Image (spheres, rainbow, N blue to C red):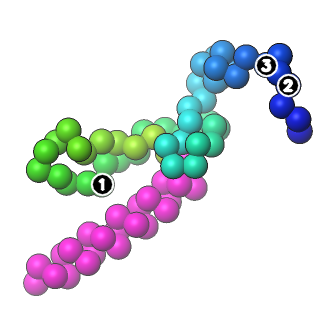
Amino acid sequence: MSEDASVDWEKLIDETNLATCERCNGVNETVTLRECRTAYADDKKNHSPRLCDECALEYNDYWDSLWADYYNGQR
């Protein structure tokens, strides 16, 4: 599918309530704010990422692994 220069993509995104994934830059209906998995002392560094479903799975797998390593080291 070729990109039509006459399409106002920003308007289309606004009208269809689509958002851009922070990780892959994809635009689709599954992009939404996801649960923040960080726990920095400075709360300004903790944010809920806007991710598509596929990137959210990878994000959660990544943080599950990091938190498992952290908690295994605490025992």
Q: Position of residue 24 (x, y in %)?
A: 58, 49
Task: Please tell me how many numbered marks the rendered image carries.
Answer: 3
Residue 8 counted in the magenta span: no
- Apparent side of residue 41 relative to residue 35 in the rendered image (left or right): left
Lateral position of residue 6 relative to residue 41, left or right: right
Give yes or no for contact between labels 2 and 1 (Cβ–Cβ under 8 Å). no
Q: CA distance from mark 2 to mark 1?
A: 38 Å
Q: Quadrant of residue 8?
A: top right
Q: CA distance from mark 1 to mark 3?
A: 37 Å
Q: Secondary structure at mark 2?
A: loop
Q: Residue at image x 27%, y 75%? A: 68
Left or right of 44? Residue 64 is right
- Residue at label 3? 7
- Up-down relation of residue 30 to residue 11 (above or below): below
Magenta span: 52-75
| Label 3: few (<14), some (14–19) or many (≥20) C-alpha neighbours in 10 Å | few
Our reading of the magenta stretch's main secondary structure is helix
Vertical order, 56 against 69 (above or below): above
Q: Residues within 10 Å of mark 2 (few under 14, many from 20)?
A: few
Q: Is residue 53 visible?
A: no
Q: Secondary structure at mark 3?
A: loop
Residue 56 magenta-drawn?
yes
Query: What is the three-letter code of the residue carrying label 3?
Result: Val
Q: Quadrant of the N terminus?
A: top right
Residue type at numbered disc 1:
Arg
Numbered mark located on residue 37 in the image: 1
- One can see residue 59 in this view: yes
User: Which residue is labeled 2 in the image?
Assistant: 4
